[in-house]
Amino acid sequence: MVSVPNEIGTTVHRFTSKLGDTEIIIETGKLAEQAGGAVTVQVGDTVVFATATMSKHPRAGIDFFPLTVDYEEKMYAAGRIPGSFFRREGRPAEGAILTSRVVDRSMRPLFPKDMINDVQIILTAFSHDQEHQIDMLGIIAASAALMISDVPWGGPVAGVRIGLIDGNFVVNPTIPQMENSILDLRVAGTADAINMVECGAVEVDEPTMLKALKLAHESIQPILALQNQMREQIGKEKSEYVSSKISDELSEEVAGKTRDKVRQIITEQTERGGRNEALEALREELTAEYEARNAAITDGTEPIKLGDVREALSEVIKEEVRRRIVVDHVRPDGRDFVTIRPLSAEVGVIPRVHGTGLFKRGQTQVMTIATLGTPRDSQNLDGLSPEETKRYLHHYNFPPFSTGEVKQLRGTGRREIGHGALAETALRSMIPPEDVFPYTVRLVSEVLSSNGSTSMGSVCGSTLALMDAGVPIKRPVAGIAMGLIKEGDNVAVLTDIQGMEDHLGDMDFKVAGTSQGITALQMDIKITGVSDEIMAKALEQARVARLQILDVILSVIPAPRADLSAYAPRMTVIKIDPEKIGAVIGQGGKVIRSIQDRLGVKIDIEDDGTVFIAAVDGPSAERALEEVRGLTEDAEIGRVYTGKVTRLENYGVFVEFLPGKEGMVHISQLADYRVNSVHDVVSMGDEIMIMVTDVDNDGKVRLSRQAVLEGWTAEEARSRDRRAPSGGGDRRGGGDRDRRGGGGDRRDDRRNSGDHSPRS
């Protein structure tokens, strides 16, 4: 540690350590002195600022821990001005929400279970060098701020990213390095165990994944030691808080009244509906008993809170469900630890859409709809990430009827964004590249019924929808959720957890992949961490389950359909000279709009000269393709064209032989005999066949009709053109004349062309 007094009388404390080969710098004492804890974490020129603050009093009337984690992306961090109308940051981008969730999931398990004081962690990107990722630095920053604060917390934790590049693991890889990595593993953990995993991969096998997880845990140890050092040297005294835990006396009393009844219900009622009804009846009976007891109080004794009674019963239910699993080896629905609930799959469920997949596992049912669009339908990203557009999107919706509840429909929440992103990651590496399948692909997963792991149901539904839509995915992907019940030395790893097991268990470990390997992981836990042995067992059970689900998917649709839906756009892709883009767009977008309006097509152009033409039928696309080629094609000496006479002069005629391109046929080249007047041979608007005989340095084109009539070769055309008379008069427009109404700046033309601008 280095402590340096600054000019305003405070002391700045500076701590350094290594994460892999990268230096991590943590500073505190200079900024935000009224926050509970405040630090900056710096790697390279990327700087993340974190604060952690707790309310002085508990929040009344709640039965959960009110933790809020917000990551704010400030565009000034990358030297940019926000693109909104107000030119200031608005609602967080999807990437910022996902970072907030990753930090939340890493911090939450280590807070006291009985604390209901509000705790707020705010992360701000002060600087982003476009080299170093922010999300794992955010975990380190949040943990360090909590460690030196007055907030009660059982940390520290640290986060790290592991890449796999050319067969070698890389700790804390940079953004450019990650472009070549087949693994994007993000791990957070304590000194003893891992407590959060988020991962995208390109079919990485289980043994490799376990090695990466172990390397991640080893790599964070120096950062954890550094935070403990910070706590010892400059940490504040932890604040006292009012425990929300109910009294032991009430807990024992409720347990004595209900334990046998709860045990009987969960033993006899293996169906979710009947079990829930029986438990709710018991809850109402117990509440009514204590309500009557409170009403009979006459001596001023404080009444028993009915909320505490319900909480005590919930604790009994939790204990009995967990005991039956780890002791009796029986789950609430009667399954053993590895059996998957009944599976079913369908495709082509809805007419007119481009593809649909309906997947059902037990009472979890998800329908995914696939839509194919043009490149202009891709999503523009306005965040600190260097990535600017996204052509594959997955959106997840979780309506209240899926759990039999009634709630107001509001905007997309963090949970929906997180689940959608996980399913998107699971299939991203299987989506064909743009040069193979030049479509924007949007998937929407509608959760129709929920009883455990709808995100993994969305993965399966998405595979079905993509194959039904004819998207040539590399391989089908399936997903499964694993659970954990740990009571002392008794450990149960559960395959395909349902809602009750998720709610009452210690871990929700989601694994997605193909027959060849893992494509996505996500782990949330409620205990301090899980061992390597538990991770290995969970991954192996997930692999076996994944293969079972893939068999069901392939029995319904063995391969992607050979043809796209009749309602999907047909896409044609060509490459043109980037210098010719302006000719296709035209001044103010006039040319490209004309083609689109006349032929009913959509045209998108990228800066590298890639042109995407989308149409509902083949002939329209072909005509548009011919026009684009004509606008960008250079005149080829010796090639024969059919052109239209556009102007007559005494010395020759002008012929448009390509869209927007004219050349001159000298009077001596109009026929295979002497011509006294051009009017004797052609008239305005005539179509004639001509050969290009010369293109000069200024782009002016000389044409010959005589060459076609006499069957000249390209070499003869060049040779005879040199001997041909040059003619007289004005040769304006006789070259490669751009008919956009002037040259203009190509960038200005794009800017004025509306939504036809090239995409980066």
Image (cartoon, rainbow, N blue to C red):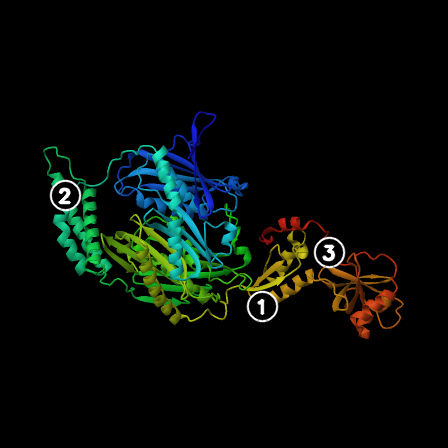
In this picture, is 246 found above or below 613? Answer: above
* Label 2 Cα neighbours within 10 Å, binned few <14 / some 14-19 / many ≥20: some
* Label 1 Cα neighbours within 10 Å, binned few <14 / some 14-19 / many ≥20: some
Task: Find out whether the residues at labels 3 and 2 contact each other: C-beta distance under 8 Å.
Answer: no
Name the front one of labels 1 and 2.
Answer: 2
**What is the three-letter code of the residue carrying label 3?**
Asp
Instruction: List the residue tagged with mark 3.
Output: 738
Q: Please report whichever mark, 3 or 2, sits nearer to the chain's N-terminal start.
A: 2
Q: Please report whichever mark, 1 or 2, sits nearer to the chain's N-terminal start.
A: 2
Residue 697 vs residue 445, the one in the foreground: 697
Residue 372: x and y in percent read 50, 61
Q: Alpha carbon of mark 1 to alpha carbon of mark 2: how far?
A: 75 Å
Secondary structure category for the residue under label 1: helix
Secondary structure category for the residue under label 2: helix
Residue 252: x and y in percent read 14, 45
Instruction: List the residue tagged with mark 2.
Output: 290
Residue 739: x and y in percent read 72, 56
Residue 112: x and y in percent read 28, 41
**Horizontal relation, residue 343 to residue 487: left or right:** right
Q: Which corner quadrant of the image does residue 685 belong to?
A: bottom right
**Horizontal relation, residue 173 to residue 629: left or right:** left
Residue 446 appears in view:
no
Residue 266 vs residue 363, the one in the foreground: 266
Instruction: List the residue tagged with mark 1.
Output: 618
Q: Alpha carbon of mark 3 to alpha carbon of mark 2: how far?
A: 89 Å
Residue 171 appears in view:
yes
* Label 3 Cα neighbours within 10 Å, binned few <14 / some 14-19 / many ≥20: some
**What is the three-letter code of the residue carrying label 1?**
Gly
**Horizontal relation, residue 303 to residue 149: left or right:** left
